[in-house]
Image: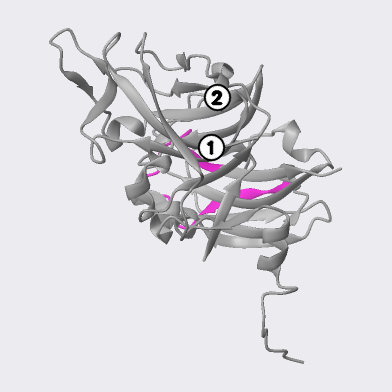
Amino acid sequence: MNNLIIKRSQLVEAQFTGTPAVTKRYAFTEIPNLSRNNIILYGFEALTAGQMSATPLGNTVIADADQPKVVVTLKDNDNLEFVYQFPLYSLVRSNNAGLVTLLEPRIINLTDCYVQLVDATGISTNEVAAFNFYYDLID
Amino acid sequence: MFVKQESREGSLMRRFEKQGFVRDYSGIEGSRVKSVVAQFGYDEAGYRLKFEQDPTLDSSQIVAIEVVSSETTSLNPQKKASSGDYIPNLSNSELANMVFVLAKNDEQIFVLPCVNAVKSTNAGKPVFVNSTDHRWADSYIELVASGIVITDFSVITLNVWYKPK
């Protein structure tokens, strides 16, 4: 059995601004580096407070108990939703016996990616859903 | 038409293996391992605890990282308190307030929440990495919260698996 090798990574976060609400799309904080055309994303994992209480940008990460309340959608540079409303819970490494979710390598369009709440109970304003994106540089 | 996958040749996982994105986790992490211990000089969110220069790691391929928590080994193996006893390692709940960053100059190669690199939180699986172009003295532990460690006392212990280049 295989597990992911981290070549390069980038922490990204989507902030629940305003009063947290279901159906609303919360965009990721823009990371210009990840939108370059020579970067391919090949895996990612979600982080909650049990793994990282706050991000290096100083934002509070959602609690472990809130993992089942968030879904994530990722789009590539062709605007294809190649990950659509995927449960954040399933992206937490410790929920998967230490395995990291692998993706068919592709260029990501972070600007159009977003997370959604299926239940806003217990989520506080300005908390973030945090992810570690694993990527490689291509020639 | 459904085609049964008879072998891994041509499969997505085979592609991942060829591109160096995955590794079998049933083997050992690498050919050599060393323990690195660093002591916190401040207790503030945003503080970066830089590692000491390490020519061995600078000239090696780093293949896996493990953070050693107090649940794994109660005391660190290198740094002692004034009492003469070895200083305790950090607990998982304390490690949830810091990230490990492998860097070269100002470039962050990867960022890893420390508690995610504790083997027991991953059902015993190590965190595989692959870096040949880094500077250990530019790498650091960053605190994301205050009030977690004790200044000039608390330590963090890492096991770094590496292969000579």
Residue A122 is one of the magenta-drawn residues:
yes
Q: Are marks 1 and 2 in contact (CB under 8 Å)?
A: yes
The residue at which mark 1 appears reads as B162
Amino acid carrying mark 1 in the image:
Tyr
Q: Position of residue B48 (x, y in %)?
A: 48, 15
Mark 2 falls within which chain? B
Question: At 39% from the left edge and 52% from the top edge, which residue is drawn?
Answer: B122
Q: Which residue occupies 48% across, 29% down? A: B100
Q: Is residue B105 visible?
A: yes
What quarter of the picture does the N terminus of chain B occupy? bottom right
> B67 or A45: nearer the eye?
B67
As drawn, B140 above or below A115: above
Q: Is residue B154 magenta?
A: no
In the picture, measured across the screen, residue B37 lies left or right of residue B134, that is left
**SS for callout 1:** strand
Q: Is residue A91 left or right of residue B119?
A: right
Q: Position of residue B28 (x, y in %)?
A: 46, 52
Cα separation between marks 1 and 2: 9 Å
Nearer-the-camera pick, B164 or B119:
B164
Residue at mark 1 shares a chain with residue at mark 2? yes
- Assign a secondary structure to mark 2: helix
Residue count near mark 2 (Cα–Cα under 10 Å), binned few <14, some 14–19, many ≥20: few
The magenta-colored residue range is A112-131
- What chain letter is assigned to the residue under label 1? B
Name the residue: 61% across, 58% down: A102
Q: Tell me, for residue B56, which label it has, or none.
A: 2
Asked if residue A23 can be seen in this view, the reply is: no
Residue B99 in the image, given as x and y percentages of width and height: 46, 29
Q: Amino acid at mark 2?
A: Thr
